[in-house]
Structure formats: structure tokens, C-alpha cells
Amino acid sequence: MSEPIKIANCSGFYGDRVSAAKEMVEGGPIDALTGDWLAELTMLILARTQAKRPGGGYARTFVKQMEQVMGTCLDKGIRVVSNAGGLDPDHCAEAIAEVADTLGLNPTIAYVNGDNLLPRMEELRAAGVDIVNFETGEPVAEIDYISANAYLGCWGIVDALNSGADIVVTGRTTDAAIVCGPAAWHHGWARDDWDQLAGAVTAGHIIECGTQATGGNYSFFTEIPGLERAGFPIAEVAADGSSVITKHAGTGGAVTIGTVTSQLLYEIGSPGYLGPDVTSRFDTIELSEQGPDRVLVSNVRGEKPPETLKVSMNSWGGFRSDLNLALTGLDIEAKAELLEAAFWKAAPYVPEDFESVTSTVVRTDHVDPASNEAATASWRLTVKDADERKCKGIGVGIGEMALATIPGYYGLAGSSFGRPFGVHTSGLIPADLVPQHVVTLGGARTVVESVAPRSDATVVPTLPALPPVPEGQTRRAALGLVAGSRSGDKGGNANLGLFTRSAESYVWLDEMLTVEKLRELLPEAADLQIERYPMPNIWSINFLIHGILQEGVAASTRQDGQAKSLGEWVRARHVDIPVALLRGGD
């Protein structure tokens, strides 16, 4: 049995702490350094960068990090795996090679591509191959996409590491693949070692978002020390697929069952967590504390993956204008009505001239406000259209409203006119049509198939023993007193995960928080499709709310277009809670 491999994360998104790579490499012993730079919105951003600077569609901050740590990684034998290649993994690898040459170093650098389907769209259509819309099951629209990338798995990374690569750069792999790859390489797993792969994917999912595993964005953040500078996480992945989630000693934040559970719920759907290498059954996970800042993740079971790969596609949706005006003091609703009427009276267009018009009154005002800010709500208007001139020209009459409409008129941050926006579409394509191409700079080129072995094995989770639902006196209080949350975007959908820290609280939550109750707590989701997935093994429930983000993050008209705060909103809602579950309380 090989020793566990210590895999450290140094990035959770494009824009994360640049110094994190150096902190992880110098903060203690590790075997591999990984980082996640890509999200659905990031692919749109990189497509815009690529259009302005051909060959530049990758995360340049990763190259900066390699300049800081490459020599140390080579000295210590630390392998580096990153999806920072984005839309141009070849150019990213070449940029790293240039840095190495400047530093007088000679690492073996490889990149993995094959995920980019954009050049193949016409070829696929001509061959009768449809990319199927993830939501509708129908072929995606035949429009001009600016990016179309399949989510690749870990086996191209494994091949590159087996070939001696010190640094591996990929395009659009799954976030967990960059952790699963080094683990599968280190332990020599086979492609049908489902349980081991599922364990590594789970570890990858936990550390992929960096400090979210060490207390960042944690509902009970007041219990976590050192969050002003949280340390990044490490997964010590064992040969059987189990892992210990930890961090370097002396760094801020904490690794607890709560922080790990919270991250497990991030941006997931059903407990059968689908991936290109394995379906990881999150309803089999067992968590236990092994000591301070050490949480064991064990018993993760796996099944074969689907025969399709997810495809992330972006297209231009047109242009949008956003107006944000203050409503202060009394008569908030009447003020909003007057502003809207005056706006359209002054505008050279009518609402029917636009493809989409969204008008919202956001009530952030307080009764008997102690400050000017506490007295203020806002009226927000968003219009969308393919005609840039209309979107830019709609604001020509705003100035004349300043002295002629509501008392206390002024504008708030967030107004813009004629800004382009993107639309995200999730699709599916047969995995056998998307092989992975592994290229070692100055060396070999190999092809790794994306098709997984056939298997009929299925997993039946064992339900834990649970106590009866608490009875007795209840008190109206915030749901967040007994439940934590984690939420995020999945294209135009949002996931909302809720977890408790005791079995008694979980059985109450499971009985109380039905889909119907959630619709009541979230009025904007009242008419939307909602899926509900209880996971008693980790005292959690996950909801997938379809369409709440409209056409994806860049197109959403919600104030929180990525649904990051959706869970905290639900925690603030008041429900009848058994007094026995409330801390200290009658």
C-alpha cells in the first residue's frame, strides 16, 4: 500500500490569492500542488480575453505563481496540476516554459486539451451528432457560440504524470479532476476502481474552492479563528480513496466537520455526484474528526460515470442596461411607481421595444431609520435587447427626472448602459467523441480515451440510525439558529444546501423543510421546479432550484446573480423551531 499523497490547493477561482501557491509550497510538506481557476462565468471572461488577445485565453495569475514557486517545486519533487489553461492550455504551457527558461530551470511541462468543441461544431452537426441541452433534452440551439468546452476527467492528467511531467496544465476539466488525477497516478488506480476514484473526487470537491474548506463562507463563521487570513486546504488521499482534509499548521481558519460538510454541499445536484470518471455517491460519505484541523472522509462509494460529458457553452445574449435609483424615507412603493412612469415617459422607447424588461423594488429601508442609508431602498430596472443602440439610448432622459419626480432623488452604484452580456447553456455529448490529447512540450503526444469501462455495479447507501423528531414547545426564530447553508450557481439553476450539527436537528429539518415549505420561504422560487435530495449520512438536505438565475450568471437580473447568498437568506427566515433544539433556550 502506497503512502497517502498530500495534495494542496492554491486557488479556488480566477482572481484568488496569488501568494497562496508560495504559502502552500513553503508552509509544510506536500506532494502535489493544484489549483482551480475555471467556472462557467470564467470561460466567458476568457473568451472575451481571447477575442482581444488571440492565444491569451488562460489564467495569467497562474503563470505568476509558477514564477514564484517553480524552483522550489522542482527541488522538493512537488508535482503541479492546474486547469488554468482555460481556452488556451497550449499557450499557457508555453508561457510557463518561458518563465522556466528565464529562471534557468528545465521542468517537464505537459498540457491536456481536447475539451474545446468550438472548432468541431459544424463537423459534429454534419455527422448528425447533437449536443443535447442539459435542461430540456433537446438539441442546443444552432447559434454562434463563443466557447463550447466539454468537462474532461482525470486520465489525461494521469498519463501526463506517468510520462514524467512536473507541471500539467489542462483546459476545462472538472474541478475535482485536478485532485483525482494526482491521486490516481500516485496510487496506480485502475479506471474501474470506482470507490477509490469516488473518494478522490470527493476530496477534490472539498478542496477545489480553496478556503471554503477552511472556514471561508461558512455559516457559523464566528466560531472560526483567523478568518482574516484563512489557510488553504490540503487533502491527504490514501490508497483506499479515503482522505484527511487538513491545512498547514499556524494558518488561519479551521477544518471541522462543519466546514467540510458545508463545502460538500456546494454547487451539487443529486447525491449521485456525476463526473466523467466516476459517479461519487455523496449519500455514503462518513465524516469524523481525527484531531484539530483533521477531518477524515471515508466510506465513499462509487459507480460508473454517465456515458456523456457535460459541455459548458457560452454565447452572446445581446446588450443590457441597468438603472439603480434611490428611494428614501416614506412612500417607497409610490416613489418607485412615479420613477418608472417618468422614466418611460422620458425614454425614446416603450417597454415593448425590448426583448426583456425587469423592474424591481428592493426594500432595504428600516422603520425609524437611524442613518440616511438605513432609510434607503432602491428601484432597479434592467432591459435587454440585441440592439446596442437602443440599450445605450434608453437613458437619455434620466437627467430630466432629477428635479421633476420624487423627493430625495439620487442614483446608486450599479447603473450602466449598453453593456454586452453572455448566456450560458449546459449540454451533453457522448464521451467517446471527446478524447483527451496529452502533449509534452518538446516531446510525446498521446491520446487518452474519455470512455469509462462498462459496469453494472450499483450502490445502495446504508441509512444511519436517527432519533425521533423532537416534539414539544416551539418558538418562532431564524432557521439559521439550527441550520447552516451553502449555495451557488449551476448555469441558470442554483443549488441550496442546508446542514445541521446534530441528528435531532436534522430529523426536524427533514420533516419541516419540504419543497412546499421552501417555496413559502423563497417567494421568488414559488413557481419554479425544485428538486429535493436528503442526505442523512451528513445531516444535510440539498435543493436544486431550476431557472432562478435565468440564463446564467452573466445574464441574471438578480442582485446576487451567482446565488452565493441564497442560503444565508433562507437561514434568516423565521420558522417554528422546537425549543429543545434552540441553544440556551426557552
Image (cartoon, rainbow, N blue to C red):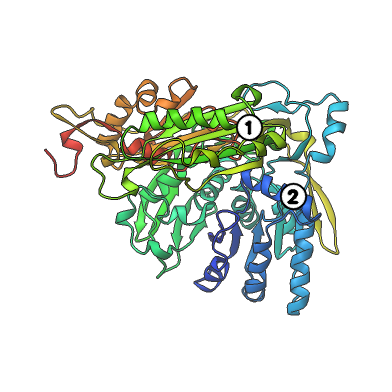
Q: Quadrant of residue 224?
A: bottom left
Horizontal side of residue 114 vs 343, given as left or right: right
The secondary element bearing badge 2 is classed as: loop
Q: Which residue was labeled with disc 2?
A: 87
**Please, is residue 173 above or below residue 211 in the view?**
above
**Foreground pick, 361 / 564:** 361
Q: Which quadrant of the structure image shows residue 278?
A: top right
Q: Is residue 422 left or right of residue 434?
A: left
Q: Residue furthest left?
A: 586
- Structural crowding at the residue carrying mark 1, measured as other residues with C-alpha within 10 Å and reported as few (<14), some (14–19) or many (≥20): many
Q: Position of residue 551 (x, y in %)?
A: 61, 32
Does the rendering let one see residue 383? yes
Q: Is residue 376 left or right of residue 240?
A: left
Crowding around mark 2 (Cα neighbors within 10 Å: few <14, some 14 to 19, many 20+) is many
How far is the residue under mark 2 from the one under mark 1? Answer: 28 Å
Q: Which residue is mark 1?
A: 384
Q: Amino acid at mark 2?
A: Leu
Question: Which residue is rendered at x = 47% and y = 46% of the image?
Answer: 412
| Viewer-side residue, 496 vs 342 | 342
Instruction: Using the rendered image of the protein, determine whether residue 538 is visible from the camera's viewpoint.
Output: no
Q: Position of residue 552 (x, y in %)?
A: 59, 35
> Where's the N terminus, which quadrant?
bottom right
- Across and down, in percent, residue 367 comes to 25, 39
Instruction: Give the residue drawn at x 62%, y 54%.
Output: 37
What residue is drawn where x is 47% and y is 32%?
339
Of the two numbered discs 2 and 1 in the rendering, the one whose residue sits closer to the viewer: 1
| Vertical side of 47 occupied by 144: above or below | above
Q: Quadrant of the C terminus?
A: top left
